[in-house]
Image (cartoon, rainbow, N blue to C red):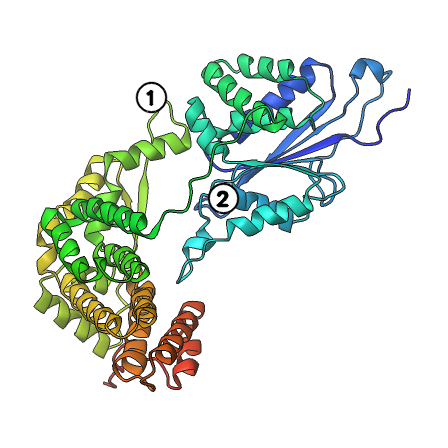
Amino acid sequence: MSLPERPITILIAALGGEGGGVMADWLMEAATAVDLPAQATSIPGVAQRTGATTYYLEIYPVRKSELGGREPVLSLTPSPGNVDIMVASELVEAGRAMANGYVSPERTTLIASTHRIYATVEKMQMADGRYEADKVVAAARELAKLTVLFDMRKLAEESGTIINAVLFGAMAGSGALPLARERCEDAIRKGGRGAEASLRGFAAGYDIARGSRKPPEQPAAPKRATELADIMRLADERLRDYQGKRYAELYRRRMEPFVRGDARVAATVARHLATWMSYEDIIRVADLKTRASRFERVRREVGAKGDEPVVVIDYLKPGIEEFASVMPAPLGRRLVAWAERRGKLDAYNIGMHIKTSGLFGYALVRSLAWLRPLRPSSYRYAEEQGLIERWLGYVAEAAKRDAGLAYEIADCARLIKGYGETHRRGKGNFLAIADALIENPPTAEAGEQASAIRKAREAALADPEGKALGTTLGKPVVWMKPVKSS
């Protein structure tokens, strides 16, 4: 008989907690159950969402009994251009696979979920660093021989299972596997616990890939009025959690001058104001790190059983600014000024490893969260609220002249984020733009002023070091007071 020249190659990219290893086991079980030679290997991923764990399988589509004692040679690693089935549990993981050459129009069936879990490199950007999902989808349809793309996480949630079952069903339904549906379902049943839910997810993925069921509908883009209402509702919840009912009422009062004005300006102010008013300080960090929901999430992500202990160690490195931020405003201001004069603002950061899953470590960190009632009298609170009022004043004044100008000024709040040096740079860039283009604009024409502000903001976001902004403004950006020589 004529034998195939090569095995069917399968590359799976899955994030932690998504059952990629279990899916690889299902594939191996289904293949060996019908006497097909198969082999699987895996490469562990890395933490903080910088990559996925990958699983590589090769299945030779001829039964061992028909090979006359011969054994196919199977590879341990994938090679670009030679992957038959590429499976990605998240959209940008599909993008990584395409960028690495594992998806080809001559060979590859690409099966991927279209939902997003943002990567570290996306979160690190000064501005909105998210990859454009539409471009990844367009590239997938162009580069792959066949695509099966839909929100598999949503379908998994509806089925009461995790995404691996839906991915497995989509693989089987695509027709690219040399395995019958019944064999795949048998492999899931042999897995034992959670099999019924996994079978529901498998069936849903299978039916969508076969075209006998519609994929979950994507939410329509919200209208401006609805968007503003949603933002303000979420902001109210966020700020009540952050500092209480009165703080949320302050947010609503600050929004009153904008809600009846231009919809785009109002939505932009609402979003940035909520984020800015809930700035990250050590009180907030301590609160989030010691919540029961956080420990439950960690246990879920590592797959710990009910009777298995999980040790959580938090790595912190607070410095002068972090300590000054929660001091009474006059004391905090003096401490930061002293450190700036001597160039010591980043000189006394203390590295700490705190076991927050233990009694002492938990109590230590939780005690910082209990400082929340004192936040309104703190140095950082006074600094942030003063700058917020200044920004709101700029936007309100500009709105009287031109909505486009008001929008560009409102969007400058994107520059303020983070803590420590990142926060100092963002604040310095914001103040430089405010001084040069808002308080002392080189032109009285609103459109030209708006364009200049937009270019300066984009330069600041593209270059955290401030050189691009300095070139745009025609003068260097200074982030802190000059250090006096002793």
Q: Nearer the viewer, residue 360 or 161?
A: 161
Residue at the right extreme, as displayed: 1
Q: Nearer the viewer, residue 471 or 209?
A: 209
Q: Quadrant of the N terminus?
A: top right
What whole-number distance in Å separates the C-alpha atoms at marks 1 and 2? 25 Å
Q: Are marks 1 and 2 in contact (CB under 8 Å)?
A: no
Going by the image, does 400 lie left or right of 200?
Answer: left
Return the residue at label 1. Answer: 306
Residue shown at the point (69%, 25%) measured from the top left: 177
**Residue 414: x %, y % from top left:** 33, 63
Q: Nearer the viewer, residue 271 or 110?
A: 271
Residue shown at the point (69%, 20%) measured from the top left: 179
Residue shown at the point (41%, 54%) measured from the top left: 123
Residue 87: in sight, yes or no?
no
Instruction: Report the amino acid beneath label 2.
Output: Val
Q: Secondary structure at mark 1?
A: loop
Q: Secondary structure at mark 2?
A: loop
Q: How many marks?
A: 2
